[in-house]
Image: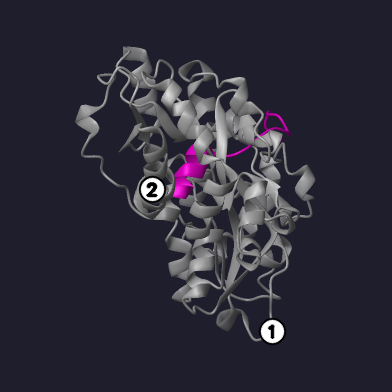
Amino acid sequence: MKFSGSSHGPSISRRGVLKGGALLAGGLAAAPVLGACGGGSGGKKRVVVADWGGALVEAEKKYIFEPFSKETGIEVVVAGPPTGAKIKAMVDTGNIEWDLIAGGPGTVLPIGRNYFEKLPDSLLNIPGLDPSYVDPNWLTYYLFSVVMAWNTSVLGAGKKLTGWADFWDTEKFPGRRTLRGADNGVPPDMEFAVLSDGVDTKSVYPIDVDRAFRRFDKIKGQVPQWWVSGAQPGQMLVSKQVAASSIFSGRIGELKAKGAPLDFTWNGGMFELASWSVVKGAPNKENAFKLMEYSVRPEVQALVWSKYPNGPANSKALGLMDKEFAKTLPSHPANLEVQFLQNSEWWGANRDPVLKRFQQFAKS
């Protein structure tokens, strides 16, 4: 059966995405200033940003938040994590602690658009931002990808996986596998399952759920564990627990740079949108809008994503970066061309039944 949902439109499990981004970044930074959150400053000189913590937020602080504060005089207070339950509770009670959240379609759609502010027109028409990256309730500021990677020493000399059909072919390419599980509300790798069965990247959505589970069943015996944190697939690859895995592109790039015998392909990769959203009733929403605009300026994007390997959402940033380095990022045109955008509309409509079914499948 094919579950309901649009086959077009922006995508991401924003929670999946940002959860992924959080896992990608590694840990969660506590916010000692959380107790001071609120509108006490009159909404003029501060903005409270709920983010996922870790190395990613440290890069954002250094290359986005601090320069923004220096330019505007607006203090950026980092809080979080921006869970859907917390956002909903804030708006329902009128006790709004956060202004801007590292959210997006995967956060907005399950909760409901009425929990978020509509963005001004000026943020919906920024040069260099693809129309699929913007929405009345979110603005994408970077991209990241989930790709297919393998341990070259386990797979064998000269062997490479060129697509998901190869990943599923454990006779031609022996070795165990791992794919993303469904813990913490993060979607499992349904898309890769149908791609392995001959579906074209342009025809992934709406996902044929039964077909995907038939493919999962085919490979299940070769999966010692379904990964649920961003560090896991890299660890399983390096330790040779598996020969091949789905993995965040930033993770595999980092491991390769450290000399691990790993390789990957962008072909059939799924890129996701990491976006800003403004909480409904945010006391400092105008400052939040200013920070959003600042974060997608080409020169700002070029700086921060040269330091942390995600893809700038503003295509104009790539021309300001080292050309060879830019080719390693998920949003480089050559890499985007062979990937597809995760469809948050479909996941928004089908997340709960798919997660429940996958969890039952994984335990059986």
* Closer-to-camera residue (284/82): 284
User: Which residue: 62% across, 21% down?
Assistant: 121
Q: Amino acid at mark 1?
A: Gly
Task: Kindly identify which numbered label has been placed on residue 158.
Answer: 1
* Highlighted magenta segment, given as a residue range: 1-21
Magenta: main secondary structure: loop
Verify whether residue 184 appears in magenta.
no
- In the picture provided, is 172 more to the left or to the right than 39? right
- In the rendered image, the vertical position of residue 246 relative to residue 286, given as above or below: below
Residue at mark 2 = 57
User: Which residue: 41% across, 38% down?
Assistant: 71
- In the picture provided, is 138 more to the left or to the right than 34? right
Within 10 Å of the Cα at label 1, are there few (<14), some (14-19), or many (20+) other Cα atoms?
few
- In the rendered image, the vertical position of residue 353 relative to residue 314, given as above or below: above
- Gap in angstroms between the C-alphas marked 1 and 2: 38 Å
Location of residue 343 (image quadrant): top right
- In the picture provided, is 38 more to the left or to the right than 184? left
